[in-house]
Image (cartoon, helix red, strand yellow):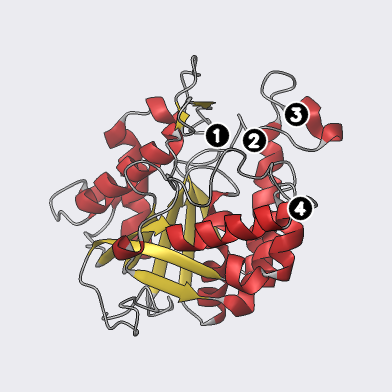
């Protein structure tokens, strides 16, 4: 670790593209700042919906080759963000995308059937041990993952939260699995979050622009199940200078993200405010110095 950056961030995400949508700007900013950024992706995203007509044959119910394709998309996205340390949990192909379906209330739930290799079915200790090895190797001061609901209920997001939380605890125990490396206690853990206030404002702008299909059924003045109340937010990273890099990285995930619709047309005009500012909830550790809004401006604040 003598040649490693002094400050190191580890992110644990479920599928390729989750990292870019959630923390792409933060990742790019920290790379540019000379901080260490390591991404662990838990599955290949094999069950994702293919949005490119000429690539529909890759889908799980056809050629079942989407995971390998998304592996390339993720590599390109990381190149665009400048992230050079990316791993798959246990190695690529160890865990498969579990799939999902939508509940009538608008959140994701488990699919009716899952593959035996599905990440949601993984043994928790076995999966955590893969991550313990990474934590002890990288020795990050900060870890970022999902909240206990996985943001919107996807079983793989929930499992990523469980694995990251368990692995973080196990990695700090000196007598646990010495063969996985020297014990390391992660100082701060954050859950990626979206500001409910920001979500409402974005929806208002979309509706005012005549877009009634993006986030269909969501009322800007109604419940925001995917948004966190502002009082729950702990940190706001302003990475506006890297909003364009985040947008380009999102375009790299072409099978999963459509970037030519009204949502992204409006987003491009508001790119810095929509894509360049990312929010977090502190789940472990002590909140560092804050701004006038009571929010940290750096995930490493206080360390």
Q: Residue at x 76, y 53 (%)?
A: 262
Image quadrant where residue 49 sits: top right
Q: Which residue is tagged 1?
A: 93
- The foreground one among 290 and 125 is 290
The residue that disc 4 covers is: 262
> Which residue is depicted at the point 19% across and 57% down?
172
Above or below, comparing residue 54 to residue 257 in the picture: above
**Relative to 47, 278 lies left or right:** left
Label 3 close to label 4 by CB (< 8 Å):
no
Q: Decide: marks 2, 1 in contact (CB < 8 A)?
A: yes
- Among numbered discs 2 and 1, the one appearing first in the sequence: 2
Residue, disc 2: 67
Separation of disc 1 and disc 3 at Cα? 16 Å
- The residue drawn where x is 59% and y is 72% is 273
Secondary element under disc 4, as helix, strand or loop, is: helix
Percent x, y of residue 139: 33, 65
Residue 36 location (% of width, % of height)? 46, 72
Label 1 element class: loop
Circle 3 residue = 58
Precedes in sequence: disc 3 or disc 4: 3
| Image quarter of the C terminus | bottom left
Query: Could you tell me how far apart the alpha carbons at marks 2 and 1 are, in whole angstroms?
Result: 8 Å
């Amino acid at each position: 670790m003598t040649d490693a950056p002094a400050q190191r961030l580890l992110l644990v995400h479920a599928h390729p593209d989750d990292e870019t949508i959630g923390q792409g700007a933060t990742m790019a900013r920290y790379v540019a700042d000379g901080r260490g950024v390591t991404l662990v992706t838990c599955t290949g995203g094999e069950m994702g919906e293919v949005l490119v007509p000429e690539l529909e044959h890759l889908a799980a119910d056809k050629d079942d080759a989407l995971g390998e394709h998304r592996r390339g998309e993720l590599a390109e996205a990381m190149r665009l963000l400048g992230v050079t340390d990316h791993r798959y949990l246990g190695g690529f192909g160890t865990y498969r995308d579990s799939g999902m379906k939508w509940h009538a209330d608008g959140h994701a739930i488990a699919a009716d059937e899952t593959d035996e290799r599905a990440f949601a079915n993984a043994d928790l200790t076995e999966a955590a041990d893969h991550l313990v090895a990474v934590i002890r190797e990288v020795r990050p001061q900060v870890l970022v993952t999902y909240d206990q609901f996985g943001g919107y209920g996807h079983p793989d997001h929930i499992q990523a939260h469980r694995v990251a939380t368990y692995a973080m605890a196990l990695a700090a125990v000196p007598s646990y699995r010495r063969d996985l490396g020297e014990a390391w206690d992660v100082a701060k853990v954050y859950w990626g979050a979206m500001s409910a206030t920001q979500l409402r404002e974005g929806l208002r702008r979309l509706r005012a622009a005549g877009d009634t299909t993006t986030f269909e059924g969501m009322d800007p003045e109604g419940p925001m199940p995917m948004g966190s109340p502002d009082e729950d937010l702990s940190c706001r990273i302003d990475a506006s200078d890297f909003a364009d890099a985040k947008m380009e990285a999102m375009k790299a995930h072409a099978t999963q993200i459509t970037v030519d619709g009204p949502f992204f047309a409006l987003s491009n005009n508001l790119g810095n405010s929509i894509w360049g500012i990312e929010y977090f909830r502190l789940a472990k550790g002590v909140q560092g110095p804050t701004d006038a809004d009571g929010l940290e401006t750096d995930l490493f604040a206080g360390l």
